[in-house]
């Protein structure tokens, strides 16, 4: 296997094939077992999310008006509670629902209302653009230098493999800006300024089309959060605008933190371009495994992170319903243990801590991680042979 | 568009902007699923057994419902193990019914995936997706008719909708009704047929039991002599026939032979299929599925619709009527050949659109389920 040496693993081709078969089996068994409880789960989450979104907007609107009356303290409490609830509703919609529905995880229901082909999420990024950049580019070319635009999102230096430039000195600052305005970062992800300035006329036209789609979607989102709902509270509109702004920021910061924990913590690997040459499905599996990291947490934490806390399982099986990731995660970990493969998981503090440390460190020149971006993994041959004999 | 229509459309747009990227209707659904405008659902109000294997289901459609014409059918969806399936059923209630409800009467079919579920498991209080009423198996309103109904089994349902309507309004035409059922205990709406006949002399019904114990040997099916005996003035009547394909074919042939083919209206439960060449063979079928999932390989028999083959392989392609009418299930043929079960024609042109609900494998073939036509 000539593509293989670029993986930081010296796996025997037979062992690699065996890993592939095991992971295929986990996928097939899980998909075959989907049924009514899974349908009930996603319907319940969607219903809860909509009730939360509506309830929180009413709370904010009423609270904002009450703050200007004698019931100032009750009003403030309502606005505060509503803001957190609206932020949570947006998080649920974007992560556990929108992201996963758009991956096709629920297409098997055959319900046109919960389908990857029709879902539009509560976010300034148009769904069709996101599906291309995310499902097609990022999930296929995960962590391959020069292919995956999600490695530092083209603006951050998150690995020493990316040449240093003085602009990265400001990285800690604009990283913070990206965190606060994350949905706009996602929304502009597909748009390539180089192509607008110096692309062919066809490239320019495509970019302008993308930009148009983004502006149209963004305008509707902005009108809803900053014009229409505030207008219902008349004079108290500024409070509603502020509450909605904070709710959007809560969603932005949280989704940024969870998503950055997926591919940037210590121990996650990036790959040279040639690794994908002649790559087999088992090879793709191992690359996904080495290029992703999980976050350990409670089931509520997993729900609020859209189960992207099971980033490894999500990258191995992107169209498997997220509600199955916890059970699948135990089986994947078991496979990793048996074959001596790394399984990158840790508490939220560890994963986000090492991610942010990297962003600070690589704003300066140098850094010494190899493509492996962590120690190369030695799979001891006798261990493997004893496994394949078993 | 008139000025008022335009301004109300603009107003609706602005109201919906409060709910963007959803619509207000999605939030209204939280309060009552019947009030939505983005999709039509119905609440199951009541279930009632008609016979041992047939049940009448009373549905309350949501506010986007359009009143049906007696004899029309409707698409009903149901989730089985999480996956949604759709089937078409005739409406058995009268459009004159005052409580806004409709009924469908479903009989369990051998090997039927959905009929068993509808009859045995559908719970009162649950919601099912619903289509709008469709079909032209109706009695003309503008001219007088003397109908002859020939129905069998649950094929009585559209006729019952018409009879109930005339009974409610009190303008029953001169109706003759011949109904076939295997045994006396299998007759759906048997009591109601007798009641209507008791209330008006203008309605006369004959129930033919095809397999009654102690009855004539063999099966007592439709024949010219039988019709002559039961309804001597059959040639003067327009006939509405609903039931199994054999019955419809026999009635059509009978009227055709008499030069009266134009007097026959028929409603089929499923598409009319040609008799296949006994040597016809199916083949290995490959379904190309969505996303980066692996292709699904299975075998398709010569007479099994590819939609059913796909479902048996655990796939759930989009579909609607399952009888070749609605084109919801059209997908492109990648390679190989398929046979249209209605005409027997073989389609082997790569890229052709295939109605998988009424087409079967004619050789090894590859079907692209991710592209809808």
Image (cartoon, coloured by chain):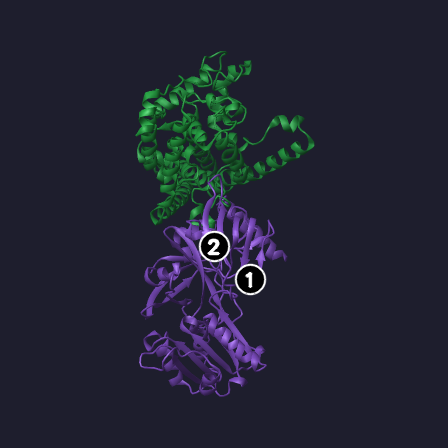
Q: Is residue B196 above or below residue A290?
A: below
- A289 relative position to B302: left or right: left
Residue B201 image-quadrant placement: bottom left
- Cα–Cα span, label 1 and label 2: 17 Å
Residue A378 image-quadrant placement: top left
Q: Is residue B332 visible?
A: no
Q: Position of residue B353 (x, y in %)?
A: 58, 53
Q: Chain of mark 2?
A: B
Q: Is residue B320 above or below residue B231?
A: above
Q: Nearer the viewer, residue A347 or A19?
A: A19
Q: Which residue is mark 2?
A: B307
Q: Nearer the viewer, residue B78 or A172?
A: B78
Q: Is residue B264 above or below residue B302?
A: below
- B361 relative position to A38: left or right: right
**Mark 2 surroundings within 10 Å by alpha-carbon count, few (fewer than 14), some (14 through 19), many (20 or more):** many
Q: Which chain is green?
A: A
> What residue is at 47 percent from the left and 36 percent from the top?
A241
Q: Quadrant of the C terminus of chain A?
A: top left
Q: Which residue is mark 1?
A: B344
Q: Nearer the viewer, residue A140 or B249?
A: B249
Q: Chain of mark 1?
A: B
Mark 1 residue element: loop
Q: Nearer the viewer, residue B307 or A161?
A: B307
* Labels 1 and 2: the sequence-earlier one: 2
Q: Which chain is purple?
A: B
Q: Position of residue A197 (x, y in %)?
A: 66, 26
């Amino acid at each position: 296997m000539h593509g293989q040496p670029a993986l930081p693993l010296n796996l025997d081709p037979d062992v690699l094939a065996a890993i592939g078969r095991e992971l295929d089996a986990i996928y097939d068994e899980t998909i075959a077992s989907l049924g009514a409880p899974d349908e009930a789960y996603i319907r319940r989450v969607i219903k809860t999310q909509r009730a939360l979104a509506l309830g929180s907007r009413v709370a904010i609107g009423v609270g904002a008006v009450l703050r200007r009356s004698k019931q100032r303290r009750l009003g403030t409490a309502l606005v505060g509670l509503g803001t957190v609830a609206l932020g949570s509703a947006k998080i649920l919609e974007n992560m556990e629902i929108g992201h996963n529905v758009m991956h096709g995880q629920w297409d098997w229901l055959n319900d046109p209302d919960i389908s990857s082909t029709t879902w539009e999420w509560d976010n300034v990024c148009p769904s069709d653009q996101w599906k291309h950049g995310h499902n097609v580019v990022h999930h296929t070319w995960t962590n391959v230098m020069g292919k995956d635009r999600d490695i530092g999102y083209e603006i951050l230096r998150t690995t020493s493999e990316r040449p240093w430039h003085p602009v990265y000195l400001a990285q800690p600052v604009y990283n913070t800006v990206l965190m606060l305005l994350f949905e706009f970062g996602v929304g502009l992800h597909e748009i390539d300024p180089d192509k607008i300035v110096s692309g062919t006329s066809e490239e320019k036209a495509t970019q302008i089309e993308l930009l148009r789609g983004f502006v149209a979607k963004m305008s509707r989102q902005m009108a809803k959060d900053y014009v229409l709902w505030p207008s219902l509270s008349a004079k108290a509109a500024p409070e509603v605008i502020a509450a909605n702004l904070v709710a959007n920021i809560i969603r932005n910061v949280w989704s940024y933190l969870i998503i950055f924990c997926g591919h940037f913590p210590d121990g996650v690997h990036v790959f040279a371009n040639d690794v994908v040459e002649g790559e087999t499905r088992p090879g793709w599996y191992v690359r996904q495994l080495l290029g992703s990291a999980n976050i350990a947490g409670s089931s509520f934490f997993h729900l609020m992170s859209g189960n992207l806390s099971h980033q490894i399982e999500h990258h191995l099986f992107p169209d498997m319903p997220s509600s199955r990731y916890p059970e699948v995660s135990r089986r994947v970990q078991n496979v990793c243990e048996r074959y001596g493969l790394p399984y990158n998981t840790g508490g939220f503090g560890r994963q986000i801590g090492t991610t942010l440390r990297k962003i600070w460190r690589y704003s300066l020149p140098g850094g010494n991680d190899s493509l492996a971006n962590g120690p190369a993994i030695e799979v001891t041959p006798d261990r493997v042979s004893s496994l394949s004999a078993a | 568009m008139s000025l008022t229509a335009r301004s109300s459309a603009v107003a609706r747009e602005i109201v919906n902007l409060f709910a963007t990227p959803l619509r207000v209707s999605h939030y209204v659904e939280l309060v009552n699923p019947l009030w939505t405008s983005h999709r039509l659902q119905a609440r199951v109000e009541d279930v009632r057994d008609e016979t041992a294997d047939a049940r009448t289901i009373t549905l309350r459609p949501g506010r986007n419902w359009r009143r049906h014409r007696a004899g029309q059918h409707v698409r009903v969806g149901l989730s089985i193990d999480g996956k949604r399936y759709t089937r078409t059923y005739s409406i058995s209630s009268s459009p004159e019914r005052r409580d806004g409800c409709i009924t469908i009467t479903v009989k369990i079919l051998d090997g039927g995936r959905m009929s068993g579920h509808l009859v045995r498991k559908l719970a009162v209080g649950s919601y099912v997706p619903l289509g709008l009423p469709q079909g032209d198996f109706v009695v003309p309103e503008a001219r007088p008719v003397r109908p002859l109904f020939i129905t069998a089994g649950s094929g009585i349902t559209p006729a019952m909708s018409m009879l109930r309507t005339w009974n409610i309004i009190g303008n029953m035409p001169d109706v003759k009704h011949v109904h076939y059922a295997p045994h006396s205990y299998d007759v759906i709406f048997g009591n109601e047929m007798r009641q209507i006949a008791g209330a008006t002399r203008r309605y006369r019904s004959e129930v033919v039991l095809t397999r009654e114990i102690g009855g004539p040997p063999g099966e007592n099916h439709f024949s010219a002599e039988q019709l002559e005996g039961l309804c001597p003035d059959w040639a003067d009547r327009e006939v509405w026939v609903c039931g199994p394909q054999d019955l419809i074919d026999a009635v059509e042939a009978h009227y055709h032979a008499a030069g009266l083919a134009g007097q026959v209206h028929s409603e089929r439960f499923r598409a009319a299929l040609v008799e296949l060449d006994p040597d016809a063979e199916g083949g290995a079928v490959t379904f190309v599925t969505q996303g980066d999932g692996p292709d699904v390989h299975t075998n398709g028999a010569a007479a099994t619709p590819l939609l059913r083959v796909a479902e048996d392989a655990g796939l759930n392609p989009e579909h609607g009527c399952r009888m070749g009418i609605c084109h919801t299930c059209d997908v492109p043929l990648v390679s190989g050949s398929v046979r249209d079960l209605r005409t027997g024609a073989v389609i082997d042109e790569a890229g052709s659109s295939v109605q998988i609900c009424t087409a079967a494998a004619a050789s090894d073939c590859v079907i692209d389920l991710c592209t809808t036509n």
